[in-house]
Image (cartoon, rainbow, N blue to C red):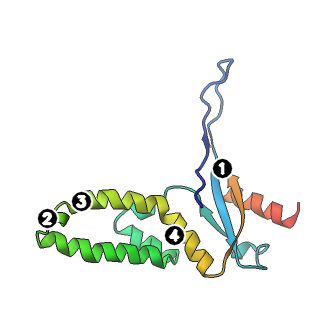
């Protein structure tokens, strides 16, 4: 499930008055069944590009922190096969930098989808989709909706 983050920007309105810039971020909320109303059990997954998955060293750390084992396996397979082949003058892997340039943005785009799949495998269920200017505002909206206020 991929939902694109909606960004609305206003520079000037019709009368020429300066208007504010507004950026709305969307999050999917996951929780284990029966624990949706407990704030410490809700996990908010952003619907955006993940810069951490793009950075070659930090993407391993991101995968372990979010328990995205499939994402980690893809990174390990790529690095254990492509990197040694580039040193053996394999013609396919001679331009390893270009291959990484193609693969890492792909991983950055789909990293949160890997995270969602990891949560589903661990028994978490999608509760809802919320939006806000930042994660704190989205959490506030979610807990207001869950508590019924």
**Mark 2 and mark 4: Cα distance apart in space:** 31 Å
Residue at numbered disc 3: 97
Is label 1 in a helix, a strand or a loop?
Answer: loop
Is label 3 in a helix, a strand or a loop?
Answer: helix
Camera-side mark, 2 or 4: 2
Q: Quadrant of the C terminus?
A: bottom right
**Mark 1 and mark 3: Cα distance apart in space:** 36 Å
In the image, what residue occupies the spot 85% across and 66% down? Answer: 147
**Mark 3 and mark 2: Cα distance apart in space:** 13 Å
Residue at numbered disc 1: 133
Residue at numbered disc 4: 114
**In the rendered structure, which disc, 4 or 3, sits on the residue that comes first in sequence?**
3
Is label 4 in a helix, a strand or a loop?
Answer: helix
**Mark 4 and mark 3: Cα distance apart in space:** 24 Å
Residue at numbered disc 2: 91
Q: Where 50 sits versus 77, above or below? A: above
Camera-side mark, 1 or 3: 3
Q: Depth check: 137 or 7 in front?
A: 7
């Amino acid at each position: 499930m991929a939902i694109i983050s909606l960004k609305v920007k206003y520079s000037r309105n019709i009368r020429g008055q300066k208007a504010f810039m507004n950026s709305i971020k969307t999050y999917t909320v996951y929780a284990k069944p029966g624990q949706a109303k407990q704030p410490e059990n809700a996990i908010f997954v952003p619907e955006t590009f993940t810069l951490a998955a793009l950075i070659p060293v930090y993407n391993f750390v991101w995968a372990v922190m979010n328990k995205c084992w499939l994402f980690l396996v893809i990174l390990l397979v790529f690095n254990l096969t492509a990197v040694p082949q580039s040193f053996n003058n394999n013609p396919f892997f001679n331009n390893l930098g270009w291959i990484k340039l193609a693969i890492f943005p792909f991983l950055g785009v789909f990293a949160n989808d890997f995270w969602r799949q990891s949560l589903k495998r661990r028994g978490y269920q999608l509760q809802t989709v919320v939006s806000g200017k930042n994660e704190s505002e989205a959490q506030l909206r979610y807990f207001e909706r869950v508590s019924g206020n």
